[in-house]
Amino acid sequence: MSIGPTGVLAATVLGLLVWVACAVAQQPAKVPLIAILSDEGPSLAVTSFEPFAQGLRALGYVEGQNIAFERRSSEGKDEILPGLAAELVRLQPDVILAVGTPAARAAKSASQTLPIVFARTGDPIGSGLVPELARPRGNVTGLSLEHSDVDAKRLELLITAVPSIKRVGVLLDANFPPAGLELREVERAARSLNLELIPEELRGPDDLKSALRAMVEQHVSALLLLPSRVIGESSQQIIDLAIKARFAAMFYTRRLVEAGGLMSYGANYPDMYRRAAAFVDKILRGAKPADLPVEQPTKFELIINLKTAKAIGLTIPSVLLARADEVIE
């Protein structure tokens, strides 16, 4: 049976359609690219990246198969963050993960369209990242360190450790935007606990010795440190000076207690980085940052260093040891 011109044309078109379909099917699927901008040094950047990667693996993402990463770290030099953010934006990633307030602000300045998820930030509203926590509205959302009663809890734990405390010194970074808000919360908590606060502002590591000397002269017996870059970078010096002054010092992260600080109470950072993976997953599946409310910490931990307690002549009450998530001996 012969095939007419119309049949030949139809067969040819059908063949072309099959060929195109096969060619499209053989095209490799685009692997989502996650850009990571961190204000930390290389070692800390690894510590924050691994829980985030674990969170993604739990959601079915495997690096090199269906997810790819491009990482930049400022190593504590905030002035280079805008340039690093611009580098990442040029790569047109599917999502940017910004670790730390300075990194989040740099990422937002670099792009008003690419989805940005932040982690470990203080006061996202005051920092200009989002207009409100429940409705971020723009291209930025994520996880904040803010929690309304965490500073009051730190003061309560200090009193439990040293019931005789009357004056508490507060170290804060004058150049860190969320510091003022946190200090006001600490002041409210101190009034309810009948404590006198002696705040000392730091503008750099060179201010540390004079600040602690002023606290000694004012008969401070305990020390509360508010989270900031300058305090994080000067942590070992602060720890050494606090032990020398025999201050019962309350820090905000377990890393500083592992380095020799007396105690810490604060958000579990690895848990926060793992939760950031869920934000990225939702965005890759089509969600908009504007529709994803900013989340606050849900997991807190109390860490106590008994070796440091012994060094300053302090006996930690058993009731407090029983409440600790970890005791370093």
Image (cartoon, rainbow, N blue to C red):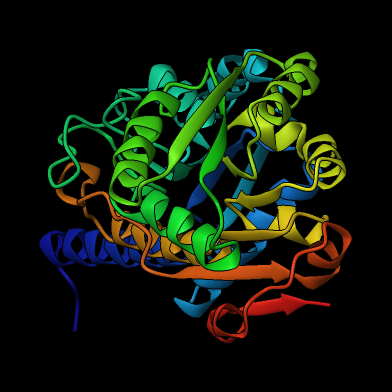
Locate residue 313, reporting x and y percent.
82, 62
For image coordinates 31% across by 29% down, the residue present is 129
For image coordinates 56% across by 69% down, the residue present is 302
Q: Would you place residue 111 above or below residue 98 in this image? A: above
User: Which is more toward the observer, 307 or 180?
Assistant: 307
User: Which is more toward the observer, 170 or 110?
Assistant: 170
Q: Would you place residue 12 above or below residue 75 in this image? A: below
Task: State which quarter of the image contains the C terminus.
Answer: bottom right
| Quadrant in the picture for residue 111 | top left
Q: Please state if 139 lies on the left or on the right of 103 as rendered.
A: left
Locate residue 216, reporting x and y percent.
72, 30
Task: State which quarter of the image contains the N terminus.
Answer: bottom left
For image coordinates 27% across by 34% down, the residue present is 139
Q: Is residue 292 visible?
A: yes
Q: Would you place residue 322 above or below residue 176 in this image? A: below
Q: Is residue 49 visible?
A: no
Task: Count the numbered circles shown.
Answer: 0
Q: Would you place residue 124 above or below residue 264 in this image? A: above
Locate residue 224, reporting x and y percent.
57, 43
Locate residue 205, reporting x and y percent.
77, 20
User: Which is more toward the observer, 260 or 133?
Assistant: 260
